[in-house]
Amino acid sequence: MSSAAVASFPLSSSVRPNRRFAVSLGLCLLGLSGLWFGLFRHLSGEWSLNEQYSYGWFVPFFALYLFWLRWEDRPRPAENASTTNVRSQGLAAISALLLLLPIRLFEIANPDWRPLGWLHATCVVTLTFIWLGRVGGRPWLRHFAFPILFIFTAVPWISPVEEPIVQGLMRIIASMAT
């Protein structure tokens, strides 16, 4: 088809915004997928080396499955979803994105420093919630909160919190076994 034929093909005004929306939606999903992949790649080191967190390899698949189940019965998007709190959402998104760069730099230098995993996961979850809020509003935020927050089950706990809990539980189990 020649460019003249394409240029003369009349497009209705309703087709252009839908195509623009689909392209921007696809780009946002691609960007979010990249952020989630980066988070999983960072956490995979702990999942591989620490047997207490080896279940982490299954958490992304379970979270995706839970999201898919929730997607099947999702509520209708709010009518004013993309116009509410645009300024605060934009500020939160920019803050999370700007925070990801130094987090990633420190993660490369200190891959076993656990607070960075929590910060990284919080930034990615925040950006995902902002996107869901823009697309579907509060009903979608409430509906999809559990599958998105489920990833925090695979983020390794900070050692000063983890050690007393694990040691205490191990003592209880040992005393029950004896």
Image (cartoon, grey):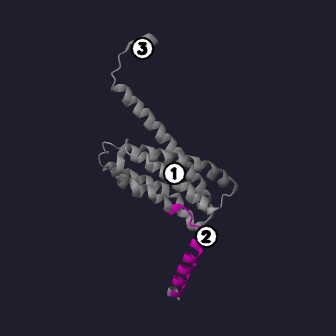
- Per the rendered image, the range of residues in magenta is 153-175
Looking at the rendered structure, the secondary structure element under dot 1 is helix
Q: Name the residue under label 2.
A: 159
Q: Which of pointers 1 and 3 lies earlier in the amino acid sequence?
A: 3
Q: Which of pointers 2 and 3 lies earlier in the amino acid sequence?
A: 3
Q: Is residue 34 above or below residue 154?
A: above
Q: What residue type is labelled 3?
A: Ala
Q: Count residues near mark 1 (Cα–Cα under 10 Å), then give few for <14, some for 14-19, many for 20+.
A: many
Which labelled disc corresponds to residue 7? 3
Q: Which of pointers 1 and 2 lies earlier in the amino acid sequence?
A: 1
Q: Is residue 69 above or below residue 8?
A: below
Which labelled disc corresponds to residue 172? none
> Which residue is more in the foreground, 27 or 55?
27
Which labelled disc corresponds to residue 124? 1
Q: Position of residue 11 (x, y in %)?
A: 35, 20
> Which residue is more in the foreground, 57 or 118?
118
Check if residue 50 falls in the magenta segment.
no
